[in-house]
Amino acid sequence: GAVVSQHPSWVICKSGTSVKIECRSLDFQATTMFWYRQFPKQSLMLMATSNEGSKATYEQGVEKDKFLINHASLTLSTLTVTSAHPEDSSFYICSATISWGSNQPQHFGDGTRLSIL
Amino acid sequence: DAKTTQPNSMESNEEEPVHLPCNHSTISGTDYIHWYRQLPSQGPEYVIHGLTSNVNNRMASLAIAEDRKSSTLILHRATLRDAAVYYCILRFGGSGGGADGLTFGKGTHLIIQP
């Protein structure tokens, strides 16, 4: 149980285009989903917290107009990288929790590798 | 979340037990200790968590020091598939805790030799 699916697994696109990444909780409802970014040889960095039906909360230094997050249902959150540039190339990972609480694990998707040419 | 300290890397042989240490000397009384691991080119995977008592599950065991300032993740019989980066993360257990994302450190890169 507690499966999180991410799509696509990888994407290559030209500079200036927008890319949408989907994160779905397959067998549970997730009030809150999280988006992380990981550059090569580095650890995961939290980008934003996505709450169903409300605006996302972005971490300091993350441009909310560039990384658009939509959490329209309890099983789907999307991250859109707008006008992507080579420096946005990274491994994007989402996670979700079944319920709140610091004793609850987060369940992660397999990530999306984004390469901007 | 309070800070944790882990060795950069560890090496072990296949089919032997592995003990991965984590120091968290500034842990508060309500912080939970979580462990995740990340296999190459994959998202992190939850391993185990605990508060005060030792915990066991099908993946691993978590031994927590009596003063809670350190903990050890135990893989009882390592396989090549256990080669990953292991992250020890504290989660605030007070009011509002758990509503935020995880703060990942550098973790321990576990190498398993056949």
Image (cartoon, rainbow, N blue to C red):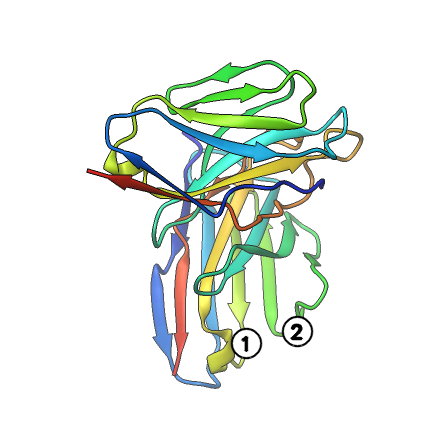
**3D distance between C-alphas at marks 1 and 2:** 8 Å
Q: Residues within 10 Å of mark 2 (few under 14, many from 20)?
A: few
Residue B76's disc number: none
Q: Chain of mark 2?
A: A
- Image coordinates of residue A47 in percent, x first then y, are 61, 59
Q: Are marks 1 and 2 on the same chain?
A: yes
Q: Could you tell me if the residues under marks 1 and 2 are in contact, i.e. CB atoms within 8 Å? A: yes
Please state which amino acid type lies under the numbered disc 2: Asp
Please state which amino acid type lies under the numbered disc 1: Thr
Q: Nearer the viewer, residue B26 or B32?
A: B26
Q: In the rendered view, tell whether residue B5 sits above or below residue A83.
A: above
- Image coordinates of residue B113 in percent, x first then y, are 24, 40
For the point 60% across and 67% down, which residue is it? A68
Question: In the rendered view, does A10 fall on the left or right side of B114?
Answer: right
- Image coordinates of residue B47 in percent, x first then y, are 45, 31
Q: Element at badge 1?
A: loop
Dot 2 corresponds to which residue?
Answer: A65
Dot 1 corresponds to which residue?
Answer: A82
- Image coordinates of residue A90 in percent, x first then y, are 46, 67
Where does the N terminus of chain A fall, quadrant-wise?
Answer: top left
Q: Element at badge 2?
A: loop
Sequence-wise, the earlier of marks 1 and 2 is: 2
